[in-house]
Amino acid sequence: MRGPAARSSDIARGEALLALARTAIAEALGLERDAPSPDADPPAEPWLEAVGAAFVTLTQGGDLRGCIGTVEPYRSLAADVRANAVAAALDDPRFPALTPEEFLRVHLSVSVLSPLAPVPCASEAEAAGALRPGVDGVVLEVAGRRATFLPQVWDQLPDPRGFLRGLRRKAGLKEDHWDGDTRLYRYTVEKYGEKFGEGT
């Protein structure tokens, strides 16, 4: 059971990540934001400067408005969150670029990924049986294609076989495509979301 100190640390961590994401989008949109004096800036947190991977998700009225992320870490977590926040707002090919007006209403969440771990997948049945609904994010690699679903997608696709069909569809494959070269990897996430009603 997590104690008060751990919960307080989680809250502080989430607030820092969400502030990074929102500030990065505001700057990319050219919006004015109140900035504290440089003398008041706290020292950089070591965990933010460590290499990490994250997804940033934007929703508006409960509907997806953008989601971009990194599956395998290669830069600091802080840099990854900033870059993916801007990409989710402006460069997600499924949506037009976020406008300054929308920015005032959009809701942000940040999901920090654990390292990838392989999933047994000699067959679709084996893979479906190995997955943990509601827990695993999954990366699919097959036929030169790659796609991932965050654990949150289990809310829409709760059946493991349906989850895998949707993942193959996202990768641009037929839903029933399966061959011996299929590779699956799992990860978990620490998800932090703004409270609804929060703005800039």
Image (cartoon, rainbow, N blue to C red):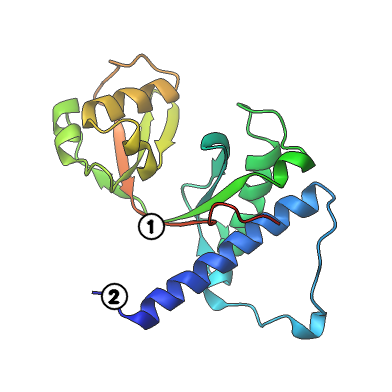
Q: Residue at x 56, y 67 (%)?
A: 15
How far across and how far down the image is residue 188, in percent? 34, 53
Query: Which residue is outermost to the bottom?
Result: 39
Q: Amino acid at mark 2?
A: Arg
Instruction: Please name whichever residue, 126 or 90, is drawn nearer the observer in this view of the structure.
Output: 90
Check if mark 1's residue and mark 2's residue have beta carbons within 8 Å.
no
Task: First in sequence, mark 1 or 2: give its number.
Answer: 2
Q: Viewer-proximal residue, 185 or 152?
A: 152
Three-letter code for the amino acid on which mark 1 is drawn: Ser
At horizontal 57% and vertical 63% (from top left) the residue drawn is 17
Q: Secondary structure at mark 1?
A: loop
Q: Within 10 Å of the Cα at label 2, are there few (<14), some (14-19), or many (20+) other Cα atoms?
A: few
Q: Which quarter of the picture shows residue 156?
A: top left
The answer for how far apart the CA atoms under marks 1 and 2 are is 19 Å
Quadrant holding the C terminus: bottom right
Which structural element holds mark 2?
loop
Which residue bears the numbered disc 1?
Answer: 114
Q: Residue at x 26, y 21 (%)?
A: 179
Against 80, residue 61 (above or below) is above
Residue 165's x, y, as percent?
A: 31, 22
Q: Is residue 67 above or below residue 175?
A: below
Q: Residue 74: give x, y in percent of width and height.
A: 54, 56
Q: Which residue, given by chain and number where applicable, does mark 2 sit on?
A: 2
Which residue is nearer to you in this view: 142 or 50? 50
